[in-house]
Amino acid sequence: MTLKEVAKRANVSVSTASKALRRSFDVSENTRRRVFEAAQALGYFHEKKKVATGNRRPDGWTFAVLCPEVISPRYSAAVQEIAAAAKAARCNTVIYNTGFDRAEILAIAQGCVDDPHIDAVLSLASLTDFTTTSVPVVVFAEQASAIYSTVHIDLSTAFGAIRDKYAGRTVTIAGEQLTRNYRQQIAPWLACDEVVGRGRYDEAGADAATQLLARSTLPDLIICTYDEIAYGLIAHLTAHGVAIPEDTEVIAINNSYASEWVHGGVSAVAFDYGDVFQAVINDVVHDLQQKQVTPRHRRVTTRFIERNTTK
């Protein structure tokens, strides 16, 4: 399959087709889309990827890392681990800031698979509808897949310890709209209700605190779906005379670096990435070397760190 055939199908010149496939700003979005659709229909990307991968040096592989929100510490820590592991394997990484829209994430992922310069995809964003097997794909997911490899955050150790400590006490999950699934995730260990703060980060935490203060009593424990929500929640509660941990205790999920110092130290659920990302990168490199995709399932363990916001 040649570029000339793609250009003919898209009704553009060969030079325009070449610019479109290189995502040049000299080509309009409509033309670029038409050229990509023609290339995909003709199987152009598949042929180019076979040639590119077959001729690529082992230290020349490039991995697309799909991240919903690169400014968030909960994702940036994982991105840094992946980039370091890839560098150790003499591979390259390209970071895509996908946002949280499922259709957009899927489109970006498909574009990476079709791109002859991308050899594998590692996604911190959900790809539940993704069904490709033409390149190695690794997804952060709750369930193993027969299509692609997965990395699973195992909450059992951390929340098993929290369950043992807070059995029979009242627990509330405080989060934002994007993290509403955490209540379902921790349900096997803790029965709890939920408050959803408006806004993002510490603003959502402050709004969640406002909702809790409107109740007749505070819960014994508030679990914040990530650290920045805990910072806003703690600041708002203490500003309104709530003593932490005497009046209510607070635990954050993720354990970003600032949690060691905020409010004298925020108790947290920490993710122990350890050598998981290096193992994932090694798996991908092995698949590329063997020219086959083998789905695998790896696990990130967690632990409960007690600091100043719990008794």
Image (spheres, rainbow, N blue to C red):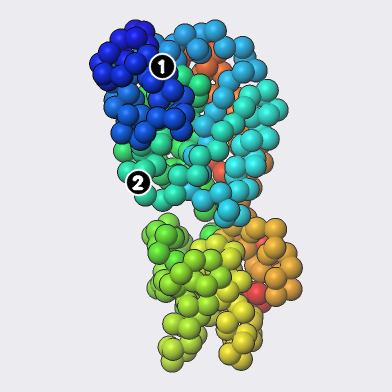
Tell how many labels: 2
Q: Quadrant of the N terminus?
A: top left
Q: Is 243 placed above or below 26 here?
A: below
Determine the residue positioned at 65% across, 40% down.
Answer: 81
Q: Return the x and y of residue 157 as percentages of the image width and height.
A: 57, 54
Q: Return the x and y of residue 53 as percentages of the image width and height.
A: 51, 13
**Residue 293 visible, this angle:** no
Determine the residue positioned at 57% across, 84% down.
Answer: 237
Badge 1 marks a residue whose secondary structure is helix
Q: How far apart are marks 2 and 1 (CA)?
A: 33 Å
Determine the residue positioned at 57% across, 55% down.
Answer: 72
Q: In which quarter of the image is the C terminus?
A: bottom right
Badge 2 marks a residue whose secondary structure is helix
Q: Name the residue under label 2.
A: 102
Q: Return the x and y of residue 2 as percentages of the image width and height.
A: 36, 8
Determine the residue positioned at 70% across, 75% down.
Answer: 263
Left or right: residue 87 versus residue 172 is right
Decide: few, some or many residues near mark 1? Use Cα within 10 Å; few <14, some 14-19, many ≥20. few
Q: Depth check: 128 or 299 in front?
A: 128
Left or right: residue 179 versus residue 9 is right
Q: Is 233 placed above or below 258 here?
A: below
- Residue 39 lies in quadrant: top left
Q: Return the x and y of residue 178 as percentages of the image width and height.
A: 42, 60
Q: Residue 15 bears which disc, if any? A: 1
Q: What residue type is labelled 1?
A: Ser
Q: Depth check: 129 or 97 in front?
A: 97
